[in-house]
């Protein structure tokens, strides 16, 4: 549809709308909320105004009277709304939230906050003209695990960090890191990368290291390894988060897990190599206490240009 440009604007906006309604409904279902995503404008308005007539709701929301009336009728049948008769004019009635609906809307507040943060995440990525922003939003949002990201915001404990054990898990560890390398350093992938990713058993586990993965509903979405290095400290490497699940704090959670693992293994320091072009990653390492190493030790691969160390005894 994008090929038709601005002439397909209405259809493209409807496609986005349908996608968001569907994904938000999946979140509501996961949270066992009794309300529908399509009810939100009317419910939020009544939450603020207490009671209104259908005509007033139509005017306030800028929606047609039949559309609002249809939604109100459905919610009355579901027990979410109540009809209040005007004591002075029996021909006039107003609509308000039922007690059941008030409770549901109260339960929905943290869900709505998470939905709002997720929308901001996608909207803040776009720039340029309106059509350029729309194209970017379509590209990033329509193919995204939107509902899963919102649910993970609401329930961080759904993420499981565990040791990598099966062939399929090691394959996922490799796939995550190949995707990361091809995204940031497509022309700087070396033999050492291939050796480590093709044979983590021999290159990491057999050398006293560990490979750990983060899973969401049994799907691997992040990973890292630690192993003893030639410098006598524990090396942290190949920390990667699946692109659709970035900016949810998963990198920080894995980094914290790596620090705990290293401490339990009794090492004095944890070391990693990175590149100065990866500003968000460097900021995260600094946040968790890693400091730039000023020694002249050679890097393990030519693409690295910064080494950071965290003192685990401090």
Image (cartoon, grey):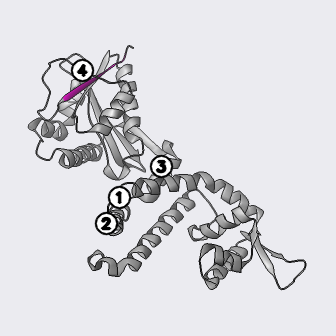
Q: Nearer the viewer, mark 4 or mark 3?
A: 4
**Residues marked 2 and 1 touching at CB (< 8 Å):** yes
> To which residue does mark 1 refer?
126
Mark 4 and mark 3 lie on one chain; the one further toward the N terminus is 3
Q: Main secondary structure of the magenta part?
A: strand
> To which residue does mark 2 refer?
132
Q: Nearer the viewer, mark 3 or mark 2?
A: 2
**Residues marked 3 and 1 touching at CB (< 8 Å):** no
Mark 3 and mark 2 lie on one chain; the one further toward the N terminus is 2
Residues at marks 3 and 1, CA–CA distance in whole angstroms: 23 Å
**Residue numbers of the magenta segment:** 306-312
Q: Nearer the viewer, mark 3 or mark 1?
A: 1
Q: Position of residue 72 (x, y in %)?
A: 68, 77
Q: Position of residue 263 (x, y in %)?
A: 37, 20
Residues at marks 3 and 2, CA–CA distance in whole angstroms: 29 Å
> To which residue does mark 4 refer?
293
Q: Position of residue 267 (x, y in %)?
A: 32, 16
Local secondary structure at mark 1: loop
Mark 3 neighbour density, 10 Å: few (under 14) some (14–19) many (20 or more):
some
Mark 2 and mark 4 lie on one chain; the one further toward the N terminus is 2
> To which residue does mark 3 refer?
152
As drawn, 68 above or below 39? below
Mark 3 and mark 1 lie on one chain; the one further toward the N terminus is 1
Q: Nearer the viewer, mark 2 or mark 4?
A: 2
């Amino acid at each position: 549809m994008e090929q038709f440009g601005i002439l397909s604007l209405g259809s493209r906006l409807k496609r986005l709308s349908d996608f968001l309604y569907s994904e938000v409904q999946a979140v509501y279902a996961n949270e066992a909320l009794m309300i529908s995503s399509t009810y939100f404008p009317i419910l939020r308005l009544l939450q603020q105004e207490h009671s209104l007539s259908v005509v007033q709701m139509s005017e306030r929301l800028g929606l047609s009277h039949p559309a609002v009336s249809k939604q109100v009728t459905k919610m009355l049948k579901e027990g979410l709304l109540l009809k209040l008769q005007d004591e002075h004019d029996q021909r006039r009635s107003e609509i308000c939230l039922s007690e059941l609906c008030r409770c549901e809307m109260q339960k929905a507040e943290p869900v709505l906050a998470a939905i709002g943060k997720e929308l901001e995440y996608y909207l803040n990525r776009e720039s340029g003209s309106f059509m350029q922003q729309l194209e970017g939003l379509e590209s990033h949002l329509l193919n995204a695990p939107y509902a899963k990201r919102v649910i993970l915001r609401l329930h961080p404990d759904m993420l499981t960090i565990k040791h990598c054990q099966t062939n399929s898990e090691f394959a996922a560890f490799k796939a995550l890191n190949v995707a990361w390398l091809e995204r940031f350093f497509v022309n700087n992938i070396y033999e050492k990368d291939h050796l480590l990713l093709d044979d983590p058993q021999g290159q990491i586990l057999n050398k006293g290291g560990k490979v750990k993965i983060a899973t969401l509903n049994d799907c691997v979405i992040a990973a890292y390894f630690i192993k003893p290095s030639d410098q006598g400290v524990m090396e942290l490497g190949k920390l990667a988060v699946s692109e659709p699940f970035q900016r949810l704090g998963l990198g920080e959670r894995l980094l914290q897990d790596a620090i705990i693992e290293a401490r339990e293994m009794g090492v004095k320091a944890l070391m990693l190599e990175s590149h100065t072009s990866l500003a968000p990653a460097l900021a995260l390492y600094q946040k968790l206490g890693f400091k730039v190493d000023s020694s002249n030790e050679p890097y393990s691969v030519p693409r690295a240009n910064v080494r950071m160390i965290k003192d685990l005894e401090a």
